Amino acid sequence: MNLHRFKASYLILPESRLIIEVITGSITLDFYTSYEMKMVNDPLYNPSYDVYVDMREAIFDGTIDQMEKYAEFILENIHIIQNRKNATIINNLHQHSYTQIFGKFNELANVPQEFRLFTSPLEAMNWLHIPYSLTQLEEIIQEMKKKPQYIGVTSTKY
């Protein structure tokens, strides 16, 4: 087993009705659940805000059992998501496989969220109608990476 770092940050922009998330490193579903709870307990959190998730530097490490546990978590906490869009930015097939599973789960469980995967940040921005330029958004993301709100270490099989 190897030890890996994970980092996550979120920024809630009420004036734009938008949440920006940046997740890097090796992610387990236990980590992701803990991170989600921290975010939804933020006083600025609004379950109807659209979400832009940058996972281009993330590595997923999860088992079927963990995915089922995460699905149960979402169903038990469905109030944390209301009618909104979720644009998740990825850049490789490994990320695509994991995020497709979550998208399919959203669909089957009638989670009130339209979920789409993108490899282009600009396409995601256009879909969400984000009122910033690509340069501005990338600057925000770079700042978020410098000061992650949630840092941890996980052990993985690779």
Image: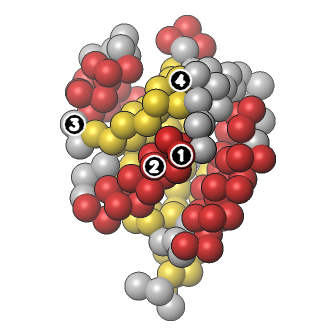
Q: Alpha-carbon neighbours of circle 3 within 10 Å: few (<14), some, or many (≥20)? A: few
Which residue is depicted at the point 35% across and 14% down? 129
Residue 112 position, x and y percent, is: 58, 30
Left/right of residue 136 with respect to residue 49 in the rendered view: left
- Cα distance in 3D space between marks 2 and 1: 6 Å
- Cα distance in 3D space between marks 1 and 4: 16 Å
Which residue is depicted at the point 48% across and 72% down? 61
Contact between labelled residues 1 and 3, with CB atoms less than 8 Å apart: no
In this view, the mark in front (3 or 1): 1
* Relative height, residue 80 to residue 96 (above, below): above
Residue topped by disc 2 = 104
**Which type of secondary structure does the marked residue at label 3 adopt?**
loop
> Front-most of 117 and 121?
117
- Cα distance in 3D space between marks 2 and 4: 16 Å
- Cα distance in 3D space between marks 4 and 3: 20 Å
Contact between labelled residues 4 and 2, with CB atoms less than 8 Å apart: no
Left/right of residue 124 with respect to residue 40 in the rendered view: left
Res. 84 mark? 4
- Cα distance in 3D space between marks 3 and 2: 21 Å
Left/right of residue 133 with respect to residue 44 in the rendered view: left
Left/right of residue 134 with respect to residue 14 in the rendered view: left
Contact between labelled residues 1 and 2, with CB atoms less than 8 Å apart: yes
Residue topped by disc 3 = 120
Residue 9 position, x and y percent, is: 55, 43
Q: Alpha-carbon neighbours of circle 1 within 10 Å: few (<14), some, or many (≥20)? A: few
**Where the C terminus falls, by quadrant?**
bottom left
